[in-house]
Each structure stands twice: as C-alpha cells, then as structure tokens.
Image (cartoon, rainbow, N blue to C red):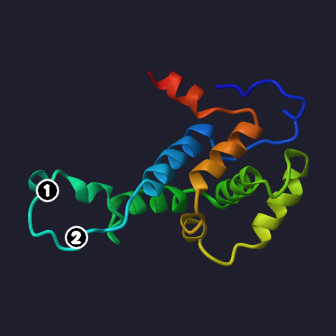
C-alpha cells in the first residue's frame, strides 16, 4: 500500500508498518467502546446473560492484554513512531515538525509505551488522524486483505 501523493511524502518515513498501526487502532477502539461494569460477579455463563460481559470494562480484559502485547512487541523506534503519530493526530504539532515531535517522544520515554498509550483517551482516533495526515488510510489496509 502506497500513501497518497502529498508534498510532504519525503519528510516522514515510518519504522512501523501502516498495517500494524491499523491493527493497534482497531484494538484501541474496541477498548474505548467498553462500558462500565454493571455486575462484577454475574454468577452465570455468557449465553445466559446475553454476553453483556464482553462489552464491559473488566480489569482482566483480553483486549487490554492484546493491545499492550502488540505495543510492547514493537522495537524502540516503532514505539517512538507510534507515540509521535498519536501526538500528531492529537494536534500537538503538524507534519512539518515530525522530527522535532519524534525527538520529544524519544526523550520522554519514562513510562512503558503501552501503559502511556493505554492511558490516553481516544488513542485510536489520534493514531488514525496521524496516519491520515501522513497520507495513509486503514481503509486501504482493509481492502488489501479482502
């Protein structure tokens, strides 16, 4: 998948594939869609309670584990690019300051990247917006897999 042609194409080279970023976006969005726990100990199985537990934000949620695992499995450069992309999508800077923003992300690595990004509300939206600003689209990734 090639990004759309923009004047800024030669400014940014990601160390992480758009496919991986889109996977993280999907997982982050499914995490954001979770609702508060209404019955912490339902005492029944899923089919009996309409599988509502799947939509609730439990501490041992496998989506959190999958998302954290995907982020932790990235190398340092990829994690830095991911944080930079989230900041870009959040509107902290624009694409012309990518190198500056990336240097800031590299310098501020005090907490694990997974913990930092999991604590960022709307991280999936920010990552997608950042990816869009670089000329990529998760829709292109999805089309390539059908």
Q: Badge 2: few (under 14), some or many (20 or more) residues near its Cα, within 10 Å?
A: few
Q: Which image quadrant for residue 92?
A: bottom right
Picture quarter with the N terminus: top right
Gap in angstroms between the C-alphas marked 1 and 2: 11 Å
User: Could you tell me residue 146's position as x and y percent?
Assistant: 44, 21
- Residues tagged 1 and 2 counted as in contact (Cβ below 8 A): yes
* Element assignment for label 2: loop
* Element assignment for label 1: helix
In the depicted structure, whether residue 3 falls above or below residue 87: above
In the foreground, 42 or 112:
42
Report which residue position mark 2 lands on. 39
Q: Which mark is residue 49?
A: 1
In the foreground, 23 or 87:
87
In the depicted structure, whether residue 34 falls above or below residue 139: below
In the depicted structure, whether residue 69 falls above or below residue 135: below
Q: Which image quadrant for residue 61?
A: bottom left
Task: Tell me which residue sits at (90%, 52%) in the image.
Answer: 97
First of labels 1, 2 by sequence position = 2
Q: Is residue 4 left or right of residue 125?
A: right
Q: Residue reaching furthest front?
A: 38
């Amino acid at each position: 998948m090639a990004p759309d042609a923009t004047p800024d194409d030669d400014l940014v080279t990601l160390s992480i594939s758009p496919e991986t970023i889109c996977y993280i976006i999907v997982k982050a969005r499914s995490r954001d869609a979770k609702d508060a726990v209404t019955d912490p100990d339902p005492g029944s199985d899923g089919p009996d309670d309409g599988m509502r537990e799947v939509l609730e934000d439990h501490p041992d949620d496998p989506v959190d584990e999958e998302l954290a695992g995907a982020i932790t499995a990235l190398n340092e450069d990829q994690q830095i690019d991911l944080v930079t992309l989230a900041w870009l999508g959040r509107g902290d800077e624009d694409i012309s300051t990518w190198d500056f923003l990336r240097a800031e992300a590299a310098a501020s690595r005090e907490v694990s990247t997974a913990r930092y990004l999991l604590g960022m509300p709307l991280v999936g939206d920010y990552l997608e917006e950042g990816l869009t600003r670089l000329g990529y689209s998760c829709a292109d990734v999805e089309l390539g897999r059908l």
